[in-house]
Amino acid sequence: MTGPMGLAFAAERDVGEISLSDSDIVDAMGRIPGYLDISTEDFRVLYHLAHHNAVDRLAEGICAATLMHGGAHGLTVDMTMAKAARTIVASGYKGLPVIDQEGRVVGILTETDFLKRMKADTFLELMLRLIEDAGEIGHRCHETPVGSAMTAPVTVVNASADFRAMLEAFRRHPGRAMPVADGDGRLLGMLLRKDLLAALTTLNWEAMP
């Protein structure tokens, strides 16, 4: 199926829609007493629409605010990378948002950003660089401000974002965690990809016929 409706149906597969073959449909229709004046394609369209409605109903109470981890402390642009590294390790995340003086998210600093700043592609390469010249690495960490190494702009999800909005946000955001902000862009917490996938798995099981 092509066109806008076909694209909408393709998007529904993000939440576990099962592809039906013609033989599946013919077998199901044969189990219903009486004559059904409906084609296999009509049956497939009805299934898509019913699945769409079921997913919407099941996902109704899920939003970024319900899935996020609150209490995340943002980094500041003038913080040194050494201090930022200690803060990130203490947080348990792989990276943290960077905020301005009003608490608005302006970027994010991740392990990948550290590697780029240290001119290494992998942590193994970074270890070798440390062995060869620990002084240079230490200098970069103590002298470089977060604002010079962070990734900006960064994808931020609003606290009221629904399930589909969160899925779309993670399509644009390659990381494992994403900042959640209020309507003014102020940091509220972190949304983890693994928590969204766990919710998706729950929806898959509950939406299955």
Image (cartoon, rainbow, N blue to C red):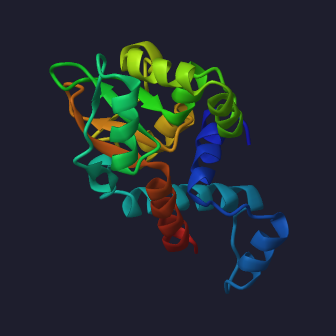
Would residue 2 be found to the left or right of residue 73 on screen? right
Q: Position of residue 44 (x, y in %)?
A: 68, 59
Name which residue lies at 51% across and 39% down. 170
State the image quarter where residue 98 is shown: top left
Residue 173 percent coordinates (x, y): 52, 33
Between 112 and 141, the one nearer to me in the picture: 141
181 with respect to 97 (left or right): left
Residue at image coords 48%, 18%: 140
Residue 151 in sight here: no
Asked if 81 appears above or below 157 in the picture, the reply is above
The reply, left or right, for residue 60 in relation to residue 52 is left
Quadrant assignment, res 77: top left
Kindly identify the residue that appears in the image at 21 percent across and 34 percent down. 182
Which of 135/43 is in front?
Answer: 135
Image quadrant in which you'd find residue 73: top left
> Is residue 200 visible in this depiction of the protein?
yes
Picture coordinates of residue 17, whole percent (x, y): 63, 60
Image position of 12 with respect to 26: above or below: above
Q: Position of residue 176 (x, y in %)?
A: 51, 44
